[in-house]
Image (cartoon, rainbow, N blue to C red):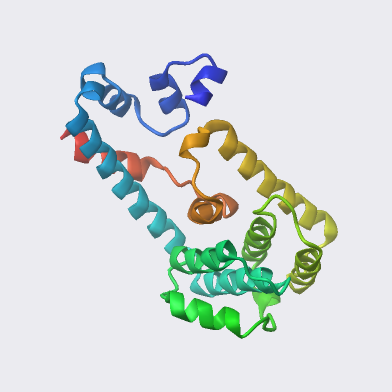
Amino acid sequence: MKYAFKNDLSIKQAAVELKVMTETLAEELLDPLMLTDVSKSAAITQRMEQLHKKVIKSKIASIELTTRQKIFEVIAAVVLADSVIAKEEQLIVYVASEALQLEITKDEVSEILSHGSTQLEGLETLNPKDRDLIYLCATWVASADGSVAEAEEKLLDEVRDLLKLDAAKANKLRDKVRTIREERSEFVPKSEELPWWDEFERILLKAADIDEIDTTLIKEIEKAIIS
């Protein structure tokens, strides 16, 4: 709705322009009769969310397992940087392990964090795109509460060195994290925003330049709803 208002568009036009729906799907879902049928619209919304989650998981699974493991290790290191682990920080490590599909339980996350900081290894062997992705994720976690603590900043510098990133590239990646956050806050109503730790899947896809909604998803939704 924010996008529609800002650009003087109808909700249908905005949905199509943002590539959330095709024109056919927008006509079907945003029809006044459909919107007033509570049970039918609720069922469709639930189905859309299920399909969306399925596609997101598939896209994240396309990231190399080694890269996903390294992302997790760096996130845990950032959380451990200041030696004080808040409840929300412990939660993001678990949420990240789930999103990265690493099959690590909550108890195992607690055990990993209880051992304290560990030496990060092998980051320089990854390809440049994956190294950028790891730094983006590290920056996102470190700045999630609105500021970066001194210990976290030091850890980010160490990660940057291990990833063989120069200062200019690191700053560019930090700017990208800020842009992702700003875009999210601009077009998503405050009431619909997820807690920062629950946004990791979509942040990860944005950081990896992977579209979370594409023609495959839209076609699946159309097939499920219109047929």
Q: Residue furthest left?
A: 227
Quarter of the image where one finds residue 42: top left
Residue 187 percent across, percent down from the top left: 54, 32
Number of numbered labels in the structure image: 0
Residue 173 spot, x, y in % from top left:
72, 53
Regarding residue 20, the answer to whether it shows in the image is yes
Nearer to the camera, 28 or 199: 199
- Please say if 52 is above or below 222: below
Q: Residue at x 73, y 47 (%)?
A: 175
* Residue located 81% across and 68% down the image: 154
Give the residue displayed 52% in from the left and 25% down from the top.
2
Residue 222 in view here: no
Q: Position of residue 177 (x, y in %)?
A: 67, 49
Residue 216 placement (x, y as % from top left)? 34, 45
Residue at 79% x, 63% y is 153
Hey, which quadrant is residue 10 in on the image?
A: top left
Examine the rendered structure and indicate whether residue 18 appears above or below residue 77: above
Determine whether, in the image, residue 67 is placed left or right of residue 46. Answer: right
Indicate whether 65 appears above or below 202: below
Name of the residue lying farthest toward the top: 8
Q: Quadrant of the C terminus?
A: top left
* 168 sits to left or right of 185: right
Q: Single out the residue that lies furthest toward the right.
A: 167
| Residue 189 shown left or right of residue 53 in the figure | right
